[in-house]
Image (cartoon, coloured by chain):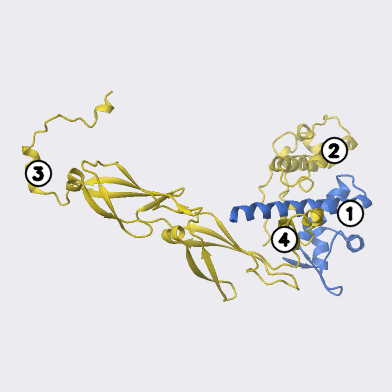
Amino acid sequence: LWTWGEARVCIVKDPYEVLGVARAATQDEIRKTYRRLAKKLHPDINPGDKAGEAKFKEISAAYDLLSDEDKRRRFDAGEIDATGAERPRDRRFYKDFAGGDGAAYDNRSGFADFAEADDLFADLLRRQRRARGADLRFTLAVDFLDAVNGATKRVAMPGGSQLEVTIPPGIEHGETLWLGGKGGAPAGEGEAGDVLIRISVKPHKFFVREGDDIHLELPITLKEAVLGARIRAPTPTGPVVLTVPKGANTGAILRLKGKGVPRNGGRGDQLVKLKVMLPDPPDAQLEAFIAAWTPAVEDDPRKGMQG
Amino acid sequence: MILNREQFIAQANLDQATLEIWIEEEWLVPGGDSAQQTFSEVDLARAQLIRDLMDDLGVNREGVGVVLRLVDQVHGLRGALADILELNRAR
């Protein structure tokens, strides 16, 4: 795909200021100044330096204008403004291809000496890009409970083959699974590429994950709240019976130890937040009872909100 | 995008003799075979880099090969580092 990705550079600054040369500077001085700056800022000599790259585009555009005697004369005479220097400078630099599939010139001999000491480096070194097949990257949407409990999924690959993907228990949204050697076939005798699967976890109807804990808002009846009860509550591994203490209020949190997301051999917790619900539809008997009820102690649940 | 030799010369704004020297020096390594060389957008960007090195950065012909070799090694190291970081994330 051939795209000129970078934003166009639109120079509005004074090109003399950008290059830092006097208005009376000779062409030779301008060229020398540009060369001095370009040596420091050229994006291919400084891959990864975003600020330097932006600056390089500025000085290149300024140099385009000032190195052209005719343009420079017209700029000095006020016939064109600095935007006269605007050009499709949004070229792709060599560095923009580095590490991609087309990085034919990728050279990893620079740390061959590390490879003797470290398997990881030896492995990386073997990834001679030219000989390897392409890495395949895609995103896999996973049900909430499959992400918590783990699962095995069959995924159709380009070319029609099926890939079995084991989703480890507890995987998080945005994590990447790396399946070495399951990617594209190599052009020659090199090894196959890898498959990189980014996991996108679908939200659940009532479970919410935070770290290794599962949060659940659990509605209870007024009667269960007032009198306490043993009720069934869903967890990712199936329902459990939990005890609602007498007088449990909306917002009270019950912790179910070890019912959360698996981690390092153990599991996080499930936090159940109670929510007291009045009967729906309204109960005439309850209404009559409350109307006749005079609390022994006057309660003000908003007492903390005064002022 | 795959270019043949003629298309590449036009897009990279080169002439036949210059391209021949660059290939001889192994600054550019075309694909295909000797009868039908092919070039990619990577080669195009690399040709622009070579031109910048010689025209603007004052690198002479001997120096270009050295610079390209070092640049490629920097990219190799950056690629390896990116692989390690990704591997680390994936685990």
Q: Which mark's residue is nearer the viewer, 1 or 2?
A: 1
* Front-lying residue, A267 or B65: A267
Secondary element at image label 2:
helix
Question: Which residue is painted at 54% across and 55% down in the image?
Answer: A175
The hue of chain A in the figure is yellow
Chain hosting mark 2: A
Q: Quadrant of the N terminus of chain A?
A: bottom right
Q: Which corner quadrant of the image does residue A33 belong to? A: top right
Q: Is residue A49 left or right of residue A274?
A: right
Q: Is the residue at mark 4 from the same chain as the one at mark 2?
A: yes
Where does label 4 land, which residue? A123
* Front-lying residue, B66 or A117: A117
Where does label 2 land, which residue? A36
User: What whole-number distance in Å separates the C-alpha atoms at marks 4 and 2?
Assistant: 40 Å
Q: Which callout, 4 or 2, points at the residue further toward the start of the chain? A: 2
Secondary element at image label 1:
helix
Q: Which mark's residue is nearer the viewer, 4 or 3?
A: 4
Above or below A218: residue B21: below
Secondary element at image label 3:
helix
Question: Which residue is painted at 79% across and 38% down in the image?
Answer: A74
